[in-house]
Image (tube, coloured by chain):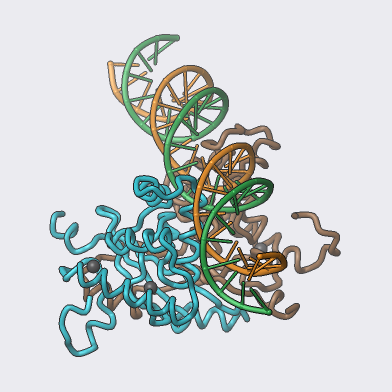
Chain colours: A cyan, B brown, C green, D orange
Amino acid sequence: MTSDARPASVEDTAPVGFQEHDHQTCVETALTSVEAQCSAEGLRLTPVRRKVLEMLLQEHRALGAYAILDQLRAEGFGSQPPVAYRALEFLVQNGFVHKIERLNAFVACSHPGQSHSPAFMICRKCDAVAEAQSSPAKGALGAAARAAGFEIERTVVEAEGLCPDCTEKA
Amino acid sequence: MTSDARPASVEDTAPVGFQEHDHQTCVETALTSVEAQCSAEGLRLTPVRRKVLEMLLQEHRALGAYAILDQLRAEGFGSQPPVAYRALEFLVQNGFVHKIERLNAFVACSHPGQSHSPAFMICRKCDAVAEAQSSPAKGALGAAARAAGFEIERTVVEAEGLCPDCTEKA
DNA sequence: ACTTGTCATGTTATTTCATATCATGTATTG
DNA sequence: CAATACATGATATGAAATAACATGACAAGT
Ligand SMILES: [Zn+2]
Ligand SMILES: [Zn+2]
Ligand SMILES: [Zn+2]
Ligand SMILES: [Zn+2]
């Protein structure tokens, strides 16, 4: 993501995932950031959890729990659903991974560390997922919530469509 | 779960925007509007489909496919999952019902007829669901999508939190 | 009337996603 | 070196969704 230093304007809003980038660095940076946060907060990034995070960082795509489980099994970890779901629960709770409700699947966070409320762009053709920021409570939804007296605690924002690559091909 | 000993009060029939309203009229109006649209567009609002829509209009809450199926069975319709899923597919495709991805459940549209991109407020305590409008493509997400060259076709916006009633009680 | 095509319904079986529960192991920490 | 909390492993089950196939209703077209 942060391949070169540029003015903040586009970089803040531009999602990782649809663009060419130094992915190796991208993975390493994220992993380092998560490790730092874990050691700072006394969270235990155990081998299973770390492995799941690595798998998700490797792809910029959402993976289902059972796809993850298959890989865990192949690497010699436990092979039953709770193994995957527990690791994912830990990663999601701490904001290192997000669940894509639309797909019942999981994706690594592109902005680890920064507290944020994510929005996703999901390509319906190639399943690529990019993460952006959202502030849904600011727009019409926020107004409706205030009008109704509803207290927003968390929002799910998922856009479905075509990524640049798939748009070109069509 | 569905039958608490609470006196049947406004709370039981409450939330279209989490507000008191004449629910009988509310249901009838929606039904009429859907009927009109179906006959205008040559859509077939068959008995199963109509029954499912009525069920969902009755509650201003999201119902799972199997809860719906249970009621269908009780009314003498088919009793297997595809019966419910097919009716729901029809209703969703035509915008009479929305799926709440967060809950894997379905809710009747509060603005039938009007073409709209809905946003939902979901109470985590009482499961009430209110529908509002959203224009997520206008805000930060739209900017990110343009920056990335992503073509948004559809968006899911779901806010989780506490409805007015549940906020008061807490 | 009868064939043909389309759409809706019904049923069986299977796949996919998710959790409850109990047993076992491994860190901390007092 | 307990006692405790947390993490993992395995079994079993529950819940959500779809594939595949068969039957029925109905509206043209012949
Ligand atoms: Zn990358
Ligand atoms: Zn994130
Ligand atoms: Zn109502
Ligand atoms: Zn609606």
Residue B100 in view, yes or no: no
The C terminus of chain B, quarter of image: bottom right
- Of residues B37 and A42, the one nearer the viewer is A42
Image coordinates of residue B74 in percent, x first then y, are 70, 37
Count numbered badges in the picture: 0
Residue at 63%, 33% in the rendered image: B77
Residue B57, percent from left and from top: 62, 56
Residue at 58 percent of width and 82 percent of height: A147
| In-front residue for pair B144/A62 | A62
x%, y% of residue B88? Answer: 51, 46
Position of D30 with respect to A69 (left or right) is left
| Residue ranking furthest to the bottom | A7
Left or right of B158 in this view: A163: left
Snapshot quadrant of residue B160 = bottom right
Quadrant location of ligand 3? bottom right
Q: Residue at x 63, y 60 (%)?
A: B61
Residue A40 vertical position relative to residue A61 in the rendered view, above or below: below
Q: Does any portion of residue A125 appear in the rendered image?
A: yes
- Which of these two is toward me, B11 or B91? B11
Residue A139, picture quadrant: bottom left
- Residue with the most extreme left position: A169
Q: Position of residue A32 (x, y in %)?
A: 32, 75
